[in-house]
Amino acid sequence: MDNKSEIIEIIYQSIDEINREEKLDIHKDILTKLFGRGSSLDSLGLVNLIVSVEEKINIKFGVAISLVDEKAMSQKSSPFLNIESLTNYILLLLIEVI
Amino acid sequence: MDKKVMLITGTRKGIGRYLSEYYIKQGYFVIGCSRSESDFVNNNYKHYCLDVADEAQVKRLFKDLLKDYGRLDVLLNNAGVASMNHLLLTPLKTVENIFNTNFVGTFLFCREGAKLMMKNKCGRIVNFSTVAVPLKLEGEAIYASSKAAIVKLTEIMSKEFANLGITVNAIGPTPIETDLIKSVPKEKMDNLMNVQSIKRYGELSDISNVINFFIKKESDFITGQTVYLGGIS
């Protein structure tokens, strides 16, 4: 499995956890909105997702990335818009540290 | 890890060293850190050398914590520096150093610590303020300001972390005879003691007394509070 597929899988696992714990029904699709209008996640849900994904990335790739750094916060288009944008952002971060 | 895990910053000497030894005796596994090596050796203690304001070093510590122990039950943000000086004689470098160690260090450890604690939906964070904040101590503008920022951080974090099962409180010690106050003139110490309701130096056990209250299981309804010693408010 290539890195991009592994990252998507990690995000889907985190969404499974959140769906279970918060009794939500967030759809696992790369265009599923994570943030902003139309998203099923509230701010706490987004925090839980980010923390879960960071931890799984840490375990899978052995690197401690921070998804909420100044780069993420200053981008014109938020990396948390949907699963695809989050995946691409994580790929960028991994390229920098690996 | 079956034992409860406690992380304490600033453990090479003073209050941090005392708290490490005390909580090991209480049955915790303690992880400590400071900028240099510690001479404290114990099977239930692990030491890290790092700068608490260095994000990469802090993230590496928590990466190890997750891998080696999988849990964090208590975080004590004790690491702190002070520099007594009139504001007009205070270099910018001093301001940056004090705010980095005291405030940024506390922020980084709280952020990363909470991520671990929320996995178990349970955690205790205790931050360190100082009586210099309510007393508005002259000569301590920068130190007291950094600690006032920690108090505000504590109060707001306590609200943001409440749903995560994490309580966040702070203790404000009076002067305790450690290296932090060794260069403060005796006259200033005596003047400070005179405004305390209870006029004595704080003891190390006064600190652990308050921390014990904050971190006990029954204190899950206590959050966002700062307790100052010696009757100061």
Image (cartoon, helix red, strand yellow):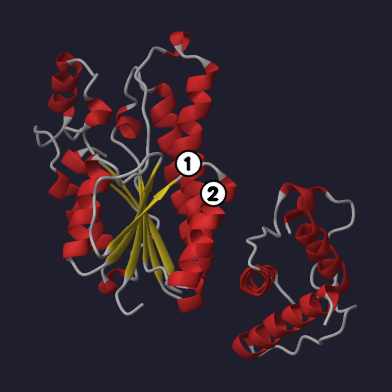
| SS category of the residue bearing label 2 | helix
| SS category of the residue bearing label 1 | loop
Q: Amino acid at mark 2?
A: Gln
Same subunit: marks 2 and 1 = yes
Subunit under mark 2: B
Could you tell me which residue is drawn at 70 percent across and 56 percent down?
A68
> Residue farthest to the top?
B88
Task: Depth check: give the residue in front, A8 or B226.
Answer: A8
Q: Position of residue B21 (x, y in %)?
A: 19, 55
The residue pinned by badge 2 equals B57
Q: Residues within 10 Å of mark 1 (few under 14, many from 20)?
A: many
Left or right: B157 as drawn, with respect to B18: right
Q: Would residue A80 be seen by someone viewing this image from the given angle?
A: no
Left or right: A16 as drawn, with respect to B116: right
Q: Residues within 10 Å of mark 2 (few under 14, many from 20)?
A: some
Q: Quadrant of residue B2?
A: bottom left
Q: Amino acid at mark 1?
A: Asp
Q: Position of residue B204 (x, y in %)?
A: 16, 45
The residue pinned by badge 1 equals B51
Q: Quadrant of residue B150?
A: top left
B26 is higher (above) or lower (below) than A21:
above
Q: Quadrant of the C terminus of chain A?
A: bottom right
Quote the CA–CA distance across marks 2 and 1: 7 Å
In contact (CB < 8 Å): disc 2 and disc 1: yes
What is the number of the mark on residue A65?
none
